[in-house]
Image (cartoon, rainbow, N blue to C red):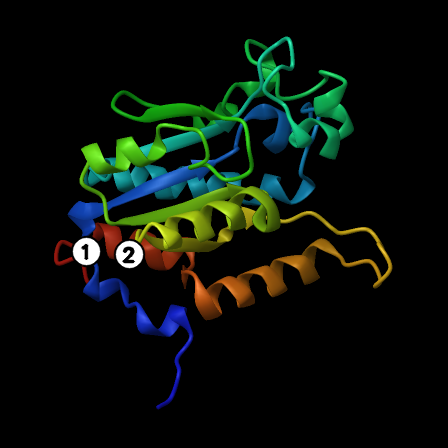
Amino acid sequence: MKILPFTEKIHLSSLDLEKTGLLIVDMNVDFSHESGGMFVPTSAEIVPRIKRLAAACRERQVPVIYAVHAHRKDGSDMGLTGRYREPIWDRKALVQGTPGVEIHPELQPQSGDVVFFKQRHNAFHGTELELILKELKLESLIIAGTVTQVCCESTVRAAFFRDIIPLLVTDGVAALPLPDVGYGAFSAEDVQRFTLTKLGAVYAKLASSDQLCDWIKDTSGEN
């Protein structure tokens, strides 16, 4: 039996748009704006694509959900996440109540959108996301945002494990380069390609923002 990659097994035309939502991961200022304490340079190019995708979703009453990474001011909920990144540990980024956890100015939530905070890479871990999806009766989730190989990947896997079909926006996620930890350094471009490949092979349907916008706008919901 031929084993097909997950991205080939799941077709947009087979999905129910009324049971699909858009999850925008960590497009708060600290990650997605040059003034942010943990700015991801490649995030600048994905902002207009996510904005267009969110607008298409709202036009068709597809729920738009924002996951925002933020920690308590006293740092009591940081855990290893704080030790992983110095700006978090030093309370210079991702602190509740600061401008850095506000959504990027170009991606401001609109009436009817849902916003929740998370404290770990996985947007399901310790949050109300699963309850939100259950309440909205969603079975598939379009995922865009930062960082491709960290929070986006963790959330894709978590959705898959919960039998929620992840639709990863290939040009709507931003990667960071990886330093050499003994096996060579990797550019952001290399990390992006590899992460999309491994997720598309096993865990997620891959689609561009244009493909998803066309699918959403098509009254029949077909690709």
Residue at left offset 35%, top offset 90%: 1
Mark 1 lies on a secondary structure that is loop
In the rendering, at what x and y percent does residue 149 appear?
60, 51
The reply to whether dot 1 and dot 2 touch (C-beta < 8 Å) is yes
* Distance from Cα at disc 1 to Cα at disc 2: 6 Å
Give the answer, above or below, for where 50 lies relative to 9. above
Which residue carries the number 2 mark? 214
Q: How crowded is the residue under tag 1: few (<14 C-alpha within 10 Å), some, or many (20+)?
A: few
Residue 38 in view: yes
Mark 2 lies on a secondary structure that is helix
Give the answer, above or below, for where 70 lies relative to 64. above
Give the answer, above or below, for where 89 lies relative to 129. above
Residue at left offset 38%, top offset 49%: 159
Q: How crowded is the residue under tag 2: few (<14 C-alpha within 10 Å), some, or many (20+)?
A: some
Residue 218, disc: 1
In the rendering, at what x and y percent does residue 82 appear?
69, 27
Residue 223 in view: no
Disc 2 marks which amino acid? Asp
In the rendering, at what x and y percent does residue 174 appear?
59, 47
In the rendering, at what x and y percent does residue 74 appear?
64, 9
The reply, left or right, for residue 56 in relation to residue 4 is left
The reply, left or right, for residue 185 in relation to residue 1 is right
Q: Quick one: quadrant of the C terminus?
A: bottom left
Q: How many labels does the image show?
A: 2
Disc 1 marks which amino acid? Asp
Residue at left offset 28%, top offset 56%: 214
